[in-house]
């Protein structure tokens, strides 16, 4: 069981990070390795397998890692238990069982969006239109096309269920049974979502901000909103306990915000209404909450030891122009395409499917209506308990206001980082479909324009895109890299079982997955030691001496070094974003004067010099295998200094 879960974890690990790299191995090879579950499940008890995962010392040299925590392997643990408990080992291979669960979750994801749009608009046609737009724009709504086991594919379906339940929970005049059901579903899905994805609490923070603004302008029942805050609090502490005391949850902005909101609510409740202090608290409510939130977060970071996800905060500082750095890891992240602003192609695709124009129209109508409602509240006019269709007040429905604020926050994030479009675009589909099919929204617009009726023609978009979708589905694509397959074959046949390999982190993930050999690093970015290892081993592509590289590699007990020609001779579209350029900047081997760059180092680039087979490189390293893409060197244990 341990071996099987680990193989699944590393499969996910590689595929998740391979979005940032060129593909380097045969996908079929990675899937076949997961069949080890079937062979080893009878040899290990579940408890033994979990213990081995949480105390794993067979993956990274000189390091024991908690694979469950660092790789967020809770989905794989659940899948392994289900696979064995259901007796599926005699019916289906482990990899197909695993992929089947992921695709099943995507079905739940789309169903949740369908239900949410239906609840908001009151018609199932809105749900159908949501699904149609989701399918048409699947390039921008999901990673399922090219990275099946990424963490988002496990987590976001639960978040969609939580949003659907929250939409129903916020509705006015909800009967008691439906309200209890929605409350229970919000509780269960919030906690599950938090367990499935290590960055889930950041997304829940944005949701909490939306609810905070909703409550601040008295557009929703305050009691319901604070019940959701309690769900956040309970989920955070339960997640902290079950995620091996994950300190990232204690210092998360979500906990600070929820604590500040509950404290502010307590102060308001315990001050007599009508007094000067109560009026001041009401006026300064938003300022008070923000101040307490920042103060609590700073205090927690001072007293709670934490290292997890610090790189995210540093990245945001640099991304927003608040700081600069020469750090290799930070600059490497800044250069990734998924962490850049969205390209024009993204907006063009959304426009061609008519999604973006309808979304902007619906958003503008809702925003104007919400502004009117807020103005009426300031003037002292109470909200209507029951909003009729002919009233044309879409902005008085709390669930609609919540979704408007939520999509704006998610959209702001997507405008900064293209990789976040997978969070925003599905809700764009849902909100646009709701608006198109909602009589109440159009009645709001008609009242402004003083129209009684307008015929809206909205052809079903899936019909025009159906031929293209069927053509894409009929394409059977397979990626095959013979050089990488040859490398994996050589390792399994020629390398000693106890050997430790060193190279780029993404290649090390592939080697561990396809061969089982121990490696010196992994592409994990939530561990300071692994971050430092990755940067140190990347020095094989820098202008450092053979002795320096030898000392780095032997400090991690590496026996073999693999040089990738694609990195050593990289010719990228952005010159300053190549790995070797980032290393030169970090090492101070580049000087920029008046726009010109000058390189200085008394050593040549290591990955080039080692191929020349002259001293001192041959004294430290011996080439044992090579093909068009990879050069493998044995790291000599006995150094012979010969000219």
Image (cartoon, rainbow, N blue to C red):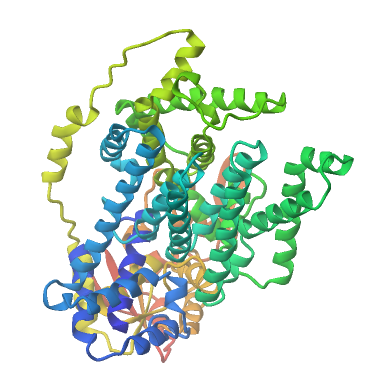
Write down the quadrant of residue 473 in the picture: top left
Judge by depth and name the residue closer to the eye, 62 or 232.
232
| Residue at image location 31% in from the left, 12% down from the top | 455
- Using the image as rendered, state which of residue 24 and residue 82 is in the foreground: 82
Question: In the orientation shown, which residue stands out farthest toward the right?
Answer: 276
The number of callouts visible is: 0
Residue 219: x and y, percent?
A: 60, 36
Q: Position of residue 392 (x, y in %)?
A: 49, 20
Query: At 43% across and 52% down in the image, what residue appears?
Result: 177
Residue 130 placed where, x, y %? 31, 36
Viewer-closest of 444 and 574: 444
**Quarter placement of the C terminus:** bottom left
Task: Using residue 33 as the reference point, say whether residue 581 is left or right of it.
Answer: right
Q: Nearer the viewer, residue 533 or 49?
A: 49
- Quadrant of the rendered image containing residue 431: top left
Say whether residue 390 is left or right of residue 254: left
Whether residue 489 can be seen here? yes
Percent coordinates x, y for residue 238 in the rendering = 54, 70
- Classify the position of the N terminus by image quarter: bottom left
Q: Is residue 124 left or right of residue 519?
A: left
Res 575 visible:
no
Left or right: residue 105 versus residue 468 is right
638 versus 491 height, above or below: below
Q: Is residue 119 above or below residue 69?
A: above
């Amino acid at each position: 069981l341990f071996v099987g879960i680990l193989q699944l974890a590393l499969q996910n690990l590689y595929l998740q990070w391979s979005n940032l790299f060129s593909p380097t191995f045969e996908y079929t090879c990675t899937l076949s390795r997961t069949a080890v579950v079937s062979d080893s499940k009878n040899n290990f008890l579940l408890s033994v397998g979990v213990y081995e995962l949480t105390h794993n010392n067979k993956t990274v040299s000189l390091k024991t890692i908690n694979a469950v925590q660092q790789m967020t392997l809770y989905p794989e643990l659940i899948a392994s238990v289900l696979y064995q408990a259901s007796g599926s080992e005699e019916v289906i291979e482990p990899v197909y069982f695993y992929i089947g669960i992921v695709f099943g979750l995507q079905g739940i994801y789309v169903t949740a969006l369908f239900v949410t749009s239906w609840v908001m608009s009151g018609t199932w046609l809105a749900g159908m239109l949501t699904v149609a737009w989701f399918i048409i724009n699947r390039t921008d709504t999901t990673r399922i096309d090219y990275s099946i086991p990424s963490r988002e594919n496990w987590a976001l379906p639960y978040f969609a269920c939580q949003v659907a339940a929250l939409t129903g929970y916020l509705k006015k005049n909800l009967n008691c049974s439906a309200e209890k059901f929605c409350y229970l579903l919000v509780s269960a899905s919030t906690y599950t979502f938090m367990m499935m994805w290590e960055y889930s609490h950041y997304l829940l923070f944005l949701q909490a901000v939306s609810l905070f603004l909703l409550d601040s302008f008295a557009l929703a029942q305050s009691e319901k909103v604070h019940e959701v805050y309690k769900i956040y609090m309970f989920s955070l502490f339960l997640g902290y306990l079950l995620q091996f005391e994950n300190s990232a949850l204690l210092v998360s902005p979500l906990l600070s915000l929820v604590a500040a909101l509950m404290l502010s609510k307590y102060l308001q409740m315990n001050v007599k209404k009508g007094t000067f202090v109560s009026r001041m608290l009401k006026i300064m409510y938003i300022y008070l909450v923000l101040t307490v939130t920042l103060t609590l977060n700073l205090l927690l970071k001072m007293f709670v030891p934490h290292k997890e996800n610090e790189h995210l905060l540093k990245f945001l500082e640099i991304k927003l122009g608040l700081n600069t750095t020469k750090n290799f890891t930070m600059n490497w992240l800044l250069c990734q395409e998924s962490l850049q602003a969205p390209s024009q192609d993204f907006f063009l695709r959304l426009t061609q499917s008519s999604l973006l124009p309808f979304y902007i129209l619906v958003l503008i109508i809702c925003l104007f209506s919400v502004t009117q409602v807020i103005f009426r509240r300031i003037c002292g006019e109470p909200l209507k308990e029951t909003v009729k269709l002919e009233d044309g007040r879409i902005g008085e429905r709390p669930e609609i206001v919540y979704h408007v604020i939520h999509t704006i926050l998610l959209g702001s994030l997507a405008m900064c980082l293209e990789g976040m479009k997978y969070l925003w675009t599905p809700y764009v589909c849902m909100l646009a479909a709701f608006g198109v099919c909602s009589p109440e929204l159009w009645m709001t617009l008609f009242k402004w324009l003083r129209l009684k009726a307008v015929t809206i023609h909205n052809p079903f978009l899936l019909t025009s895109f159906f031929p293209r979708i069927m053509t894409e589905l009929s394409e059977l694509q397979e990626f095959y890299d013979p050089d990488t397959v040859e490398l994996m074959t050589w390792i399994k046949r020629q390398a000693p079982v106890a050997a430790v390999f060193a190279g780029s982190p993404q290649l090390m993930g592939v080697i561990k997955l396809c061969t089982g050999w121990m490696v010196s690093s992994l592409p994990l970015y939530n561990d300071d030691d692994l971050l430092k290892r990755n940067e140190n081993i990347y020095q094989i592509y820098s202008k450092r001496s053979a002795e320096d590289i030898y000392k780095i590699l032997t400090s991690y007990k590496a026996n073999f070094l693999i040089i990738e020609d694609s990195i050593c001779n990289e010719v990228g579209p952005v010159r300053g974003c190549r790995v070797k350029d980032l290393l030169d900047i970090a090492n101070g081997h580049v000087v920029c004067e008046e726009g010109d760059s000058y390189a200085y180092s008394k050593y040549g680039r290591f990955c080039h010099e080692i191929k020349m087979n002259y001293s001192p490189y041959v004294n430290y390293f011996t080439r044992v295998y090579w093909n068009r893409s990879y050069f493998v060197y044995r790291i000599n244990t006995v150094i012979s200094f010969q000219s």
